[in-house]
Image (tube, rainbow, N blue to C red):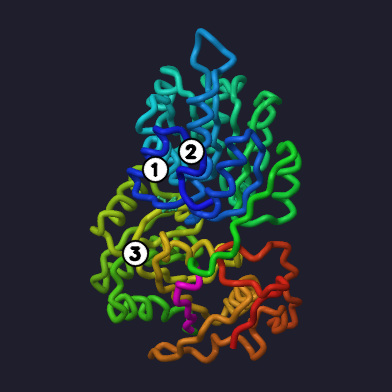
Amino acid sequence: MQTFSELDLIEPLQRAVEAQGYTKPTPVQAQAIPLLLAGRDVLACAQTGTGKTAAFTLPVLQHIQTRRSGRTGRRPIRALVLTPTRELAAQIGESIAGYGQHLQIPHTVIFGGVKQGAQVRAIERGVAILVATPGRLLDLMGQGIVDLRDVEFFVLDEADRMLDMGFINDVRRVLRDLPSKRQNLLFSATMPESIIQLAGSFLDNPARVEVTPNATTVEKIQQSVMFCARAQKRFLLASLIRSLGVESAIVFTRTKHGASRLVKQLEQVGISSAAIHGNKSQNARTRALDGFRSGEIRILVATDIASRGIDVDGVSHVFNFDLPNEPESYVHRIGRTARAGKGGVAVAFCDETEGAFLRDIEHLIGMSIEVNEDHEWHDAASVPPPGRGGGGGGGSRGGGRPKQTTVRRPEGLGNRTSDGQRRRRG
Ligand code: AMP
């Protein structure tokens, strides 16, 4: 499938897609859209950046536009999209508005952290598509404001992150309120056993969609690791921001507190930045994100949850100031650069306590990350003992066994060899 016109999308959607300037569907779109238009349930393994939002938004819009609702006399919620974070919810809302620009399909987005009044009014005016985060949705269901009895199309977006964030029971509660006859779609960046189980509990004979490993995305990212003592990391970062000609960068820290502290430290050396994390008000997050998008703020310091799915083009650098303790997060983080097929640079800092995290990451991605010692803060004490990484599950640190990861190698991340083995490098 090479062009959008081969996808059987109705004309107003074709026009909207053309207006976005897309010339051909991405692999996940080419696979998922025909299945969804044919009414199938779909289990899709695809991460942010693959075009997954359009892969479900376009079929949802077409479904609403072309099929009559069984109800007359009122305007029921016909499609529900559940997503873990406010930012993702807002982005999906924007996609629906964009792709649905030639259709009159009312939709709205609800999430926590802001007053509910405006959201309630939007729902009471009648929406066909509701995009929601779980907490606010359950809240409004409990108040009798949201009624899911007529949902025909249910999308669970970023299911793995939903589970990571502890939303599994919320998701199950929402599922209990949906009518049994409906079309379902589950998107997840990774497919651990817990996701397969969840999928099995509500998808009906789903078609599997997996994006074929796309070497262009992550292989275009130039990755390196620098060993540096914890206390020196901020100096290393400031020096790199200056010397690398960073245009726009996201810096990841493990904690909210660490993000706020780093912003202050960068300010002290004359680098302006903003933090985005769960303790910030929705307004502060929106302001930071808008400033970053417009180029006013060059450096965004973020925690994983807050950054999840942030869709900003032209991020030149990603810094892993702290290595994530979940190796999958590394992949999500560096995927913030190299959007829309562009290249990017990802630099990881590894201190004396993080050797095991580095090993897990290299195990997951199946390759060693190039070490850059060419800086004045290089700290030999932070270098994990020989045998680290290499993807094969060899070098474990401190006698710990290499983690038996049930997570498949994320799509879009380099090539597997033809027999599915992880590739070793170096
Ligand atoms: P997503 O994976 O949904 O977060 O989308 C990632 C980015 O790809 C977004 O900026 C989309 O606007 C863009 N995108 C989606 N579909 C296409 C396409 N067919 N061609 C080019 N860019 C696309």
Residue 263 is labelled as 3
The answer to whether residue 83 is above or below residue 349 is above
Mark 2 residue CB less than 8 A from any atom of ligand 1: no
| Contact flag, marks 2 and 3 (Cβ < 8 Å) | no
Mark 1 or mark 2, which has the lower sequence index? Answer: 1
Q: Residue at x 28, y 78 (%)?
A: 242
Residue 379 in the figure: left or right of residue 408 = left
Mark 1 residue CB less than 8 A from any atom of ligand 1: yes
* Label 1: which secondary element: helix
Magenta stretch: give its range: 218-226
How many angstroms separate mark 1 from mark 2 (CA)? Answer: 9 Å
Reading the image, the residue beneath label 1 is: 17
Mark 2 or mark 3, which has the lower sequence index? Answer: 2
Q: Which residue type carries mark 2?
A: Leu
Mark 1 or mark 3, which has the lower sequence index? Answer: 1
- Would you identify the image quadrant in which residue 214 lies? bottom right
Residue 321 in the figure: left or right of residue 329 = left
How many angstroms separate mark 1 from mark 3 (CA)? Answer: 38 Å
Q: Which residue type carries mark 3?
A: Val
Q: Residue at x 36, y 38 (%)?
A: 15
Reading the image, the residue beneath label 2 is: 58
Q: Which residue type carries mark 1?
A: Val
Q: Residue 329: horizontal and vertical position, in percent?
A: 55, 63
